[in-house]
Amino acid sequence: MQGEQYLNPKRIPTIWCPGCGNGIVVHAMMTALDKLSVPSEDVIFVSGIGCSSRTATYAACDNIHTLHGRALPVATAIKLVRPDKKVIVMSGDGDSLAIGGNHLIHAARRNIDLTLIIFNNSIYGMTGGQVSPLTPSGKRGTTAPYGSIEEQFDTVKLLEGAGASYIARSGVSFFQPTVKYMKNAVSHNGFAVVEVITQCPIYYGRMNKHKSPAEMMQWQKENMVSLEKAEKMTEEERSSKILMGEFVCKEKPSYIEKRASMFKELCK
Amino acid sequence: MKKIKDIWQGAEACAYGAMKAGLDFFAGYPITPSTEIAEYLSAMMPKKGKTFIQMEDEIASIVALAGASMAGAKAMTSTSGPGYSLMQEGIGYACMVEAPLVVCNVMRGGPSTGLPTKVSQGDVMQSRWGTHGDHPAIAISPSSVQEMYSMTIEAFNLAEQYRTPVTLLTDETITHMREKIEIDPDKDPPLVRRLCPTCRENYLPYGTFVDDVPVIANLGDGYGTSVTGLSHHDDGFQTADYSISRALIERLSRKVEKHSKEIFDIEVWNEKASIMLVCYGITSRSVKALLARNKECGGGLDIGMVRLKTLFPIHEETLWNSLAHAKHIMVPELNLGQIVHEVKRIVGHQIPVSLISKTGGELINPDELCEEVVKINHAR
């Protein structure tokens, strides 16, 4: 498997359920790192709590599995102490947008040089299927048995407003684009985020009448469209689709660069 | 560093002590009455190429310290009651992953927002049991601007030595007051730094110990270090195994408790007096004032003092030995009684122990203290 040098074989199998999409997200990241030829000694994986956050613990690289929601401030500090390393945060939708939402917007505002992968399975898997801030309105979870009456976040818009300088969205049914976005995110100077839509067949799927993991992946194929394709669609056609692609990719001074110039100025 | 003889604020002395201790990383959030410490450091640190960052809240601050620390930095934050409460989960995380770090908690009146600008000693038990689960705790208590300097260095040394969070438990008055400070760099204690492994072969982050303290590679050194707040195996990977989890929890406390004799530090005045006042922090200044006045007036009261420079861990035998001869023990505190229960537990029913309590944001003045002591003196 491409990129398997970044995984610790002693820690496999993972805790993930059969049909879970998390493994595809991890494979995409490991493939991206391999394509970029990043030595595993140069990567530090950071995560919070949740199914996807277990990713860090499966890595052969240095890794730290932190508290629920707190991966970003931990990663921020690690990057500030070791700016020479690639610091990659693997997080879920609950971890990064609910309990960790404050840290997310501030990491984006600082434009701190981190890569954040958001595994968006629209549910809290580890605790057994509760609704998250990315559960689509009307969909069910164990804490919203009649359907969620809340609106979900649009991660891309939220992060753009907060100042992230690289934002992409993909899905596990689109492996090659996902690898490409992850490569670009890891190479980016500043705060780079890739939201990857993935399936939780056991909780989200069962609660919302999806027949199988394959059907959920097929659903992505039918409902996610690239930004290029979306341009040719009418407003009405677009509104029922989930857009994918690179939404923001801009150069602006990163936190590490700004700190370096402040130090240079003061230590003259 | 040059010799210094000056009048400083407690906050300034703390910041200076942290720099002297080798502070690499500070993350914090503004909160009265601790903010001056962050302000001083925000000016001092960048000039030395060290990172100061104001985080979005105290939760972010404490976990940032844990991250920085596990990557090899000497890390510190300063806060006060509400912020200290928010930090408790992160402090437990630091205990579990064995991240050395220093939290300076400047106590103010609580609970809740309470009395932000007023003094208190209400967080003593929070510094021991604030986070959930069984865990080690080290808390030290400065009582002068001079000690805001020396004890900040000590806090870093203890954190590095035992790989655990250390609370510098100070208060609004000690932090804001200005008084004489003398710094002679030659007299500063030697700095302690955690041990790091030198060989990658068969490396296990939680597998090699010196005196129960693990020898962990810093994140970024590429040893393949795994760190988790879950109960973990010697390779840093999670486990729910009964015997491994039990051994881990027991070791975490043992690594501190077995050194409680050398960590526990007290200052004793009039060691043979029949009435002993057990005090700490700002309250000991009132006690010292009373003792000095008593001496000036011919020593009519047979009173002495045991000042706890260390609040946790308490070496019970040392404390008992300093009090065993007393006929009565009095414990003045700016709370409804916290350390008094530790004292009672240790002396048992053999010596009467009474609390002198004051809350509401004011100090116990020496006259009030004198009144209480005279009452006991007459009763005896």
Image (spheres, coloured by chain):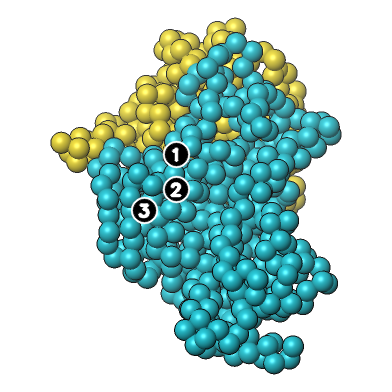
Chain colours: A yellow, B cyan
User: Of label 2 and label 1, which has the lower sequence position?
Assistant: 2
Mark 1 chain = B
Separation of marks 1 and 3 at Cα, in angstroms: 16 Å
Mark 2 chain = B
User: Of residues B80 and B188, which is closer to you in this image?
Assistant: B188
Coordinates of residue B299 in the picture (x, y in percent): 55, 84
Tell me the element at label 1.
loop
Q: Is residue A79 above or below residue B40?
A: above
Mark 3 Cα-neighbour bin, 10 Å: few <14, some 14–19, many ≥20: many
Q: Residue at x 67, y 78 (%)?
A: B275
Q: Amino acid at mark 1?
A: Leu
Q: Which residue is denoted by mark 1 in the rendering? A: B191
Q: Which residue is denoted by mark 3 in the rendering? A: B15
Quadrant of the rendered structure where residue B340 is?
bottom right
Q: Are marks 1 and 3 on the same chain?
A: yes
Q: Are marks 2 and 1 on the same chain?
A: yes
Coordinates of residue B65 in the picture (x, y in percent): 48, 43
Mark 3 chain = B
Q: Amino acid at mark 3?
A: Ala
Separation of marks 2 and 3 at Cα, in angstroms: 10 Å
Q: Is residue B183 above or below residue A123?
A: below
Q: Residue at x 43, y 53 (%)?
A: B150
Q: Residue pushed farthest left?
A: A268
User: Of label 2 and label 3, which has the lower sequence position?
Assistant: 3
Q: Amino acid at mark 2?
A: Ile
The reply to whether discs 2 and 1 touch (Cβ–Cβ < 8 Å) is yes
Q: Which mark is residue B153?
A: 2
* One can see residue B351 in this view: yes
